[in-house]
């Protein structure tokens, strides 16, 4: 046990799960989108839906989508700030099954037209899990630089990605593989000890059979 486990995150309250965790989900989602958010459909589930308004969950999620962290004093005013910036925000209910009680589904549109759908879970104490990206399971915390590669389920793609990381001296901390069905859509989720160079991500995007590359950088 460390000091964080005892006192929790440094944050603007009132709740580490409904506020700090919600900010972090929004922040990670913004980083994964890789650009400013133009519009966001925010669909709440479970306790996030039932008690989130009183805990500031909606404001916290929007604050994170604008790049704020859990200790930012602007969090209570995030909805007004988003309106001033021309960011279109809508809220609703997520129709999920067997999801974590503190869950949110985010459908994001970036300023260049890039889209991203993320399901995030707030696990308590400001700790979160990114459970899905674009409808496929992922399950990562956002504590490491994370490379998410959507590809067609066919031989060779895992080798191409891991060989590239080795060539760039990027060590893999953990790796998860998912697929919808044999020969269908597949996803690699790779948490790394170092940042992945931007030119390597661009190289991956142009490989035949790779449909989408999403990257969570911890820089900036």
Image (tube, helix red, strand yellow):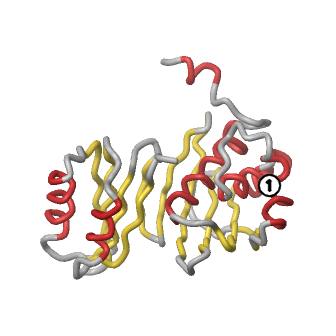
Q: Is residue 62 left or right of residue 146?
A: right
Residue 210, percent across and down?
28, 76
Question: Measuring 60% from the left and 19% from the top, which residue is drawn there?
Answer: 6
Q: Is residue 55 left or right of residue 189?
A: right
Name the residue beneath numbered marker 1: 78
Q: Is residue 81 left or right of residue 20?
A: right
Residue 34, percent across and down?
51, 64
Q: Of residues 145 and 57, which is closer to you in this image?
A: 145
Residue 39, percent across and down?
69, 73
Write down the quadrant of residue 113 in the picture.
Answer: bottom right
Vertical comparison of 60 with 37: above or below: above
Vertical comparison of 182 with 149: above or below: below
Question: Measuring 80% from the left and 55% from the top, which residue is drawn there?
Answer: 78
Question: Measuring 61% from the left and 47% from the top, which residue is drawn there?
Answer: 24
Vertical comparison of 155 with 74: above or below: below
Question: Measuring 63% from the left and 30% from the top, which residue is drawn there?
Answer: 9
Vertical comparison of 208 with 144: above or below: below
């Amino acid at each position: 046990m460390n000091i964080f486990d005892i006192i929790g995150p440094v944050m603007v309250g009132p709740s580490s799960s409904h506020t700090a965790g919600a900010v972090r989900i929004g922040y990670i989602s913004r980083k994964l989108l890789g650009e400013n958010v133009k519009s966001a459909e925010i669909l709440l589930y479970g306790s996030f839906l039932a008690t989130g308004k009183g805990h500031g969950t909606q404001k916290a999620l929007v604050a994170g989508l604008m790049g704020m962290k859990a200790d930012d004093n602007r969090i209570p005013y995030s909805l007004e700030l988003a309106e001033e910036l021309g960011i279109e925000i809508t809220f609703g209910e997520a129709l999920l099954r067997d999801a974590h009680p503190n869950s949110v589904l985010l459908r994001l549109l970036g300023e260049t037209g890039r889209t991203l759908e993320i399901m995030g879970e707030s696990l308590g104490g400001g700790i979160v899990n990114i459970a899905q990206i674009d409808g496929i399971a992922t399950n990562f915390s956002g504590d490491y630089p994370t490379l998410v590669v959507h590809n067609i389920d066919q031989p060779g793609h895992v080798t191409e990605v891991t060989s590239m990381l080795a060539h760039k001296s990027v060590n893999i901390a953990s790796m998860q593989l998912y697929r919808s069905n044999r020969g269908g859509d597949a996803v690699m989720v790779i948490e790394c000890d170092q940042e992945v160079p931007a030119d390597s991500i661009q190289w991956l995007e142009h490989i035949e059979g790779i449909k989408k590359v999403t990257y969570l950088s911890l820089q900036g």
